[in-house]
Image (cartoon, helix red, strand yellow):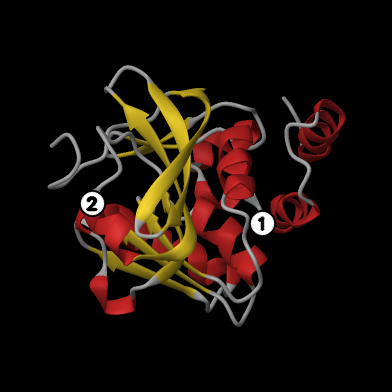
Amino acid sequence: MTSKKELIKHWISSGIITDKNVVGAFKNVPREIFINENNIHEAYGDYPLAIGMGQTISQPTTVMMMTEALELNKGDKVLEIGTGSGYQAAIIANIVGKKGKVISTEIIADLCSLAQKNILKLKLKNIKIVHCDGSKGYKNEAPYDRIIVTAACPKIPEPLVGELKENGIIVAPVGNMNEQIMIKAKKNKGKLIEEKLGHFMFVPLRGKHGYN
């Protein structure tokens, strides 16, 4: 079993993660709260774990790479598409702080309930979980400083581009259902300037702008 300390040591020594705020959030947020009880001994294994309903919690390295790519600041308002069990939202909330806000959408009602319970355990008050089709965005809280999509999408959904602030950053795995490329894109004069961060494998995004 890999430990939290071992993962941090690996990330820092290899240069995979360099942002101290991201490492700090990983230290502060207990991943074991967000996984099934029968997987507790695997909490810090560097691989995804099933959380039920055909969904997974991403491997720690992937979560931290996506978080670092967002270039988060204190006070940022962040939209997350795909709450899952709430771990990514908790990591982001830890970084943006009390003056920041995370709006996280989840299309599966039972996962919304699970995530709400997990967030309550940590007493994080800067996270709002919404049961809706996040691929269509969430106008009620737009615009956003940062947007993160935690499921594979055929392309970055247009509604999300519209809800991202100028100079804002969106991170999303884009491709087919077998393999995706992580895209980091910055909004410049209404258009996205894209950067590729490598190959990944995610569960498919559900909803109007997803795969089903």
Which residue occupies the extreme front position in the image?
189
The label shown at residue 158 is: 2
Kind of residue sitting beneath label 2: Glu
Determine if residue 168 is in view: yes
Specify whether 181 is left or right of 211.
Answer: right
Position in image of residue 60 (x %, y %): 61, 37
Position in image of residue 211 (x %, y %): 17, 34
Specify whether 39 is left or right of 54.
Answer: right
Q: How many numbered callouts?
A: 2
Position in image of residue 38 (x %, y %): 51, 35
Q: Is residue 76 above or below residue 151?
A: below
Q: Residue at x 56, y 76 (%)?
A: 100
Rendered image quadrant of residue 62: top right
Which residue occupies the extreme top position in the image?
178
The label shown at residue 88 is: none
In the structure shown, which secondary structural element does the residue marked by tag 2 occupy?
A: helix
Specify whether 9 is left or right of 178.
Answer: right
Q: Residues within 10 Å of mark 2 (few under 14, many from 20)?
A: few
Which residue occupies the extreme bottom position in the image?
99
In the structure shown, which secondary structural element does the residue marked by tag 1 occupy?
A: loop
Measure the C-alpha gap from mark 2 to mark 1. 32 Å
Q: Is residue 175 above or below residue 211?
A: above
Rendered image quadrant of residue 180: top left
Quick one: quadrant of the N terminus? top right
Q: Residue at x 37, y 19 (%)?
A: 179
Position in image of residue 115 (x %, y %): 41, 59
Determine if residue 84 is in view: no
Kind of residue sitting beneath label 1: Val
Q: Residue at x 62, y 60 (%)?
A: 72
Q: Which residue is mark 1?
A: 29
